[in-house]
Image: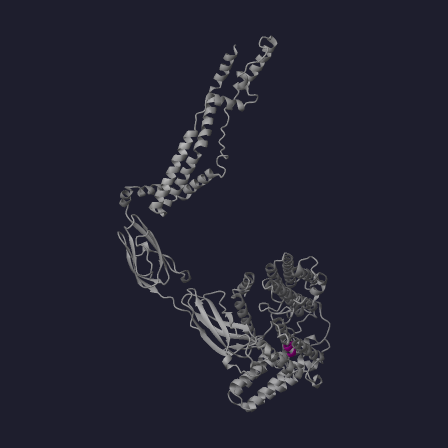
Amino acid sequence: MAQADRVNAVLSKLNWVLSLTRLGLFSERLIRAFWPVWSLIFIVSAALMLGLQDVLSVEVVWVVGLACLAGLLVFTWRGLRRLSLPSRDDALVRLDDTLPGRPVQTLLDQPALGQTDPATAAIWQAHQNRMAEKAARARPPRPNWVISHLDPFGLRFTALLLLCIGLLFGSVNRMSSVSAMAPGGNTAASIAPASWEGWISPPAYTGLPTLYLNDLAQGPLELPVNSQVTLRLYGEIGALTVNETVSARTEVPSAADPAQSFLLKQDGTLEIAGELGRRWDVALIPDARPNLEVTQEVSTSDRGEMTLPFTASDDYEVVDGTAVLTLDLGKVDRRFGLAKKPENVTAIDMKLPLPITGQRQAFDEALIDDFSAHPWAHLPVEVTLQARDAAGQTSDPVVVQFDLPARRFFDPMANALIELRRDLLWSRENGPRIAQLMRAISHRPNEGVFRKDSDYLRLRTILRHIERVIPEGIPDADRDAIAEELWAFAVELEDGDLDDARERMERARERLAEAMKSGATSEEIARLMQELREATEDYMRQLAQQNNQDEDFSHDQQQAQNSIQMTQDDLQRMMDRIQELMEQGRMAEAQQALEEFQRLMENMRVTQGGQGQQSPGEQAMDELGETLREQQGLSDQAFRDLQEQFNPNAQAGQNSENEGFSGGEGRGQSHDGTGGTGSGQGEAGEGQNGEDGQGLEGQLADQQQALRQELRRQQRALPGQGTPEGDAARESLGRAGEAMDGAEQALRNKDLAEAIDQQSEAMEALREGMRNLGEALAQNQQNPGQEGQAQNNQGSARDPLGRNPGQQGMPGTEQGLLQGEDVYRRARDLLDEIRRRAGEGERPEIERNYLKRLLDRF
């Protein structure tokens, strides 16, 4: 067979493959030539399906439409110029490129040499046959539709995405609305009837639902002021119009605008004029201004905190309130250190506390703050209170005038130091006078002016500091440091020891007796009576603390049983009786009752039971009580550290938002680095330096770990095994241990909020375990032979008021800090303090969430 016949035979078998290859080549050229055309069509279609033509004006639609049409024509003309039909040879080349060895081209080739040589011709013939077999097995190649080199920014994919958005969120039927903008299109649009929709949304703070105007019959309407009216008009422009006199707008848009929105500001009418229109007579419900009243006179707590009760109300909600405290300079007795012009009379702005839960339409609250360290303490001030509602309206200002309540100092030296401190903060010009007075006070220290030599040395140190900075004008930093040192010195002198407390109580009693004899006013007598109450409470507290700490204190058991014990209610009733007699003018009887009160206080003895050996149950209760106090201390420390994370410029434990510097009873570790007492502290001693590199959290985690180990030891030695109460106690301590482990892990992860929650659960489980253990011990006491020596010691180690020692009551019992009605008073004070702090918006969110959880729990 001739070579030409062989080639024709092979190519005839590839006709179908070549046709498909030519079709693929044509599709490639078609896509490359017209991809801008279909991209533009996709974009325009998406815009029409999304209703863009209904939002834009007719002019803009026409301009954009013409620009798109021009672009479509340009892209189409350019594509037609570039488009050409692929030939058979083009298909052969494409097909041959996809086959190994290019067999089609080989079939078309001729040998250059050796055509007359039989051997060469045989080799060439064999080669041709192999290429023919390969060409016969050819398949049409896949078209190459990649046009990234023509569209480097991917505009075709953006157009496809817009088309998908139009199909999903638009409507194909909306594309026909563009025909109404063409010449003659209004005729078709006018055939459709005009329609409308409307909504009235009252302000969010009213809590009222949105009204759908289409469902309301025309007539009178009563709506809150500032309600939002939203109207939508459909159909031919001008078929429906909006006529209203309720918005009080000065610039009124066209009444035929398809979309209108305005606020209700005044009574009037609202009308949608046209076919199926309606009309309403609108009467507005005014938003009344909030009201605020002071319900009681300002009072002072034992700690010197000011409490100003008030009530606030509004027709919807009170959202905010302010209290501005200003110095009433005209009423200040401008003598001595106050004769100078004050350096700072800036008003003090405070936020009024609001309820955390419940309605805020009407509520009673109290403004609580401590101004004991402020220069205006005990000076005449004015407090202006105002409440604000959600509409931004404020109540009429309520002005209250009083002497700023603060802590009173009964010790003469402490009182003098506080007055010198006030003069220094009043004006730096008082510096020489203050130094002169301090020299006069310390002129003869050996005449009984100072109780201790250290007090004299401390005063002289402060004096040298003042005299050193007087030539410099007493810079701010030195003035603040001196004021802080004077305050700390005065507080230490005032609190003092038992003898100091007894002297203050005696001095207060003498002042009251002298006032009764000299015929003082009822206000002065009431003030002195309050001073006597506070001094007596301080004395009793100091006496109880001394008795609890004195290990050598003991009395004969018979003498303890015969001694007189008084409850706090008895003491309170005696003082109330004295005040009642004074208010009735029966001064002779009041003086006699006061003398009897003095004799009782002088003859009072503290009874204490035997100092016998503690039983295992009692020892376990004591150890669990110490563990509970240590855990409370760690929780307090974690909470203070959490506060200080958001107050980095405040000194540790001393800022206004961080109560309780160094803690009180049961503190795990103070801010100054000194640890608390107890087993947990001792075992954590090696880890307090934060060897794990975690800082304060690492120290607390080490102490928490040591406390957990101590609890595990106590749990193993817990008595009462086998009894239901003992097993319940062990189960409770197990839960406490798990919570301690969680607290330790949270502290190592620096999650103080989670650690506080876990520590709270641990303390609750400890309390429950102590209660269960107390029941087990009581059960053993009723069953002799099991643990006959276990007892509650209810008659031993009582303080002068007949209470159990310490401030936590007997371990394992429900006895609390206070008794009688004082329990509810103290609980109310604590709850008010938590609510006040939780209502302060400037506090960190994490702290306010913690306080809200406390409120939910209690």
Toward which corner of the image does residue 771 lie, by quadrant?
bottom right
Left or right: where 70 falls relative to 821 = left
Q: Main secondary structure of the magenta part?
A: helix
Toward which corner of the image does residue 164 lie, by quadrant?
top left
Toward which corner of the image does residue 192 lie, by quadrant?
top left
- Whether residue 605 can be seen here: no
Q: Which residue is located at x 48 percent, y 78 percent?
A: 401
Image height of 328 relative to 590, above or below: above
Which segment is the magenta one? 489-493
Q: Residue furthest front?
A: 471
> Residue 703 versus residue 390: which sits nearer the camera?
390
Q: Which residue is located at x 62 percent, y 74 percent?
A: 479
Tell how many labels: 0
Left or right: where 593 falls relative to 184 = right
Residue 198 % position (x, y): 34, 54
- Quarter of the image with the C terminus is bottom right
Residue 370 part of the magenta-drawn span: no
Residue 729 % position (x, y): 64, 63
> Residue 230 versus residue 680: which sits nearer the camera?
230
> Residue 397 versus residue 729: which sits nearer the camera?
397
Residue 695 % position (x, y): 66, 60
Left or right: where 222 falls relative to 453 = left
Image height of 520 relative to 230, above or below: below
- Whether residue 215 can be seen here: yes
